[in-house]
Image: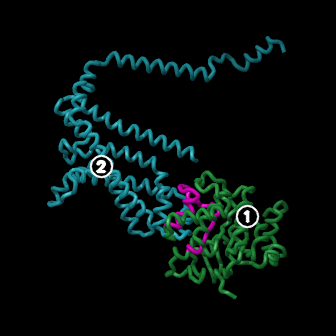
Amino acid sequence: MSSRAKQAVTDTIQPKRKLSPRKRAQRIRWIQYTLLVAIAVAAALAADWGQIVDVFFRPSLISRAVTSGLFNALVNTLVYTAGGFVLGLVAGTILALMKLSQVGPYRWMATAYIEFFRGLPAIIIFIGFALLPLAITGLRIPFPPYGTAWLALGIVASAYTAETVRAGVQAVPRGQVEAARSLGMSPFTANRKIVLPQAFRIVLPPLTNELILLVKDSSLIYIIGLTIAAAELTTFGRQLANTTANLTPLVVAGFCYLLITVPLSAIVRRMEASTEKAR
Amino acid sequence: MSEPLVTIEKLHKSFGDLHVLRGIDFSVDVGEVVCVIGPSGSGKSTLLRCINLLERPESGTVHVAGVEITDIDCDIDAARRQIGMVFQQFNLFPHLTATENCTVAQETVAKRSKAEARRIAQEMLERVGLADKVDQYPAKLSGGQQQRVAIARALCMQPALMLFDEPTSALDPELVGDVLTVMRQLAEDGMTMLVVTHEMAFAREVADRVVFMDDGVIVEQGRPDEVIGSPQHDRTRSFLRRVLDPTHVQPT
């Protein structure tokens, strides 16, 4: 075949094809990048940077927040969260075992508790705890205000961890229980030594996610009314923002939450990656 | 004649509508090695699992070492210490090392000291040829090694009886021999063993008695050369033909 004849054949098969699909995708991507840059530049030019810095990042207020008890508030947030999480984990594990029990009433009680407290907005539980001492005269929750905060956060956390731990227990193969029981272990020992350690390993990433949620839920404690010494990050930032009529203290408090939550989610990602590898 | 170690009488077990065991009468003497063979679904594994009550039979009785396992008043956890069990899927505890797999029940159930439990674990792991793997986690071990750890784990409780539920069925062919050799040594040391297996060579060479089960009943039993060599029943013959000469089977 002559080269001219070949040319004629390709012409008939591909009548005026403009761009290959890959080339076209490449062009579209370039258009998107250009557009994004244009929007960013337009926004940067339109913004009043002086005012933004003044309202959100005023240096004098940043240093005032840091010197007037930011660290104390951060520690309080950590203490409230940790106490609530430990309480929630213990109660949640008991609830999970109740939900998996052979005994009907245990199952019903656990289900009712979990559905009730998982279905309510956390803020309602906190309002409830704030009003409880008024409703029941003579009621004293120990370690005020920490006891109340731990109890409220623990109740919120337990309903969620219960479901997570239950899923973990159910993910442990049946053969593990059979092997443990056939060695003469009681159901309790088999759970404690064989099933729960494996279940917790399985649910460590979702449990850490729940810890992250609880860090944020700890901000709801402001509802029960806190003294300055007991203030956690949100209460602290809000009070300072109110007195200074500026958002900078709130931005600082918000940044502190990120200091806690971002490393935690990095840990979750790493744990998920390593379990992926172990498979 | 001494009392048999295991006595099973009129055992029935159903899963829903499925009548898996239809009246089993059966006994195992002290020191005897009994292999149970039969097609899948014949109830072999269920029979084995009824002996340590992993399955609860509907009716009938099981006695092991003079204790009625099926009695509601029986302390099943104490009774199970007498009965070692080895599973098809090994069921090692993945979060514990080989040694810890062997010590956990010794410490929690037999209440032995840490040091003594470790010493016994070491001894049993040596016995199954894994002296160099004592600190490995199961995931780092081959299937054959895992199954031998499982055997050592059961032996640590010093059982009077060992149950094997298709112990080599999940293994790669070249690893089967390691496990069967350990089991043969165990038999030679005088352990009473009840083995559900498809390994005809093992049944023929090691077993004192072979039991052929089909459809929830014991069809025939006797010395290995009788049952495997010259079976009396059609069902046994057709099963053995399929197992021993699998390339000339009429597909059904």
Which amino acid type is marked by label 2? Answer: Ala
Q: In this view, does A60 lie to the left or right of B134?
A: left
Identify the amino acid type marked 1: Thr
What residue span does the magenta drawing correspond to?
A: B80-107
Residue plotted at (67% across, 87% down): B2
* Residue indicated by mark 1: B181
Disc 1: host chain: B
Residue A138 percent location from the top left of the image: 15, 61
Q: How many marks?
A: 2
Q: Which chain hosts label 2?
A: A
Pick the residue in front: B46 or B170: B170
Q: Where is residue B14 in the image (x, y as percent from the top left)?
A: 60, 74
Chain in cyan in the render: A
Residue at image point 76% right, 14% down: A7
Q: Which chain is green?
A: B
Residue A131's x, y, as percent?
19, 53
Number of the label disc, if any, that sits on residue A248? none
Q: Which residue is drawn at 78% across and 73% down?
A: B236
Occupied quadrant, residue B232: bottom right
Query: What is the CA distance from the residue labelled 1 to the residue labelled 2?
Result: 62 Å
Q: Check residue A122 in the rendering and tell me which mark sits there, or answer none.
A: 2
* Residue A109 visible in the shown view: yes
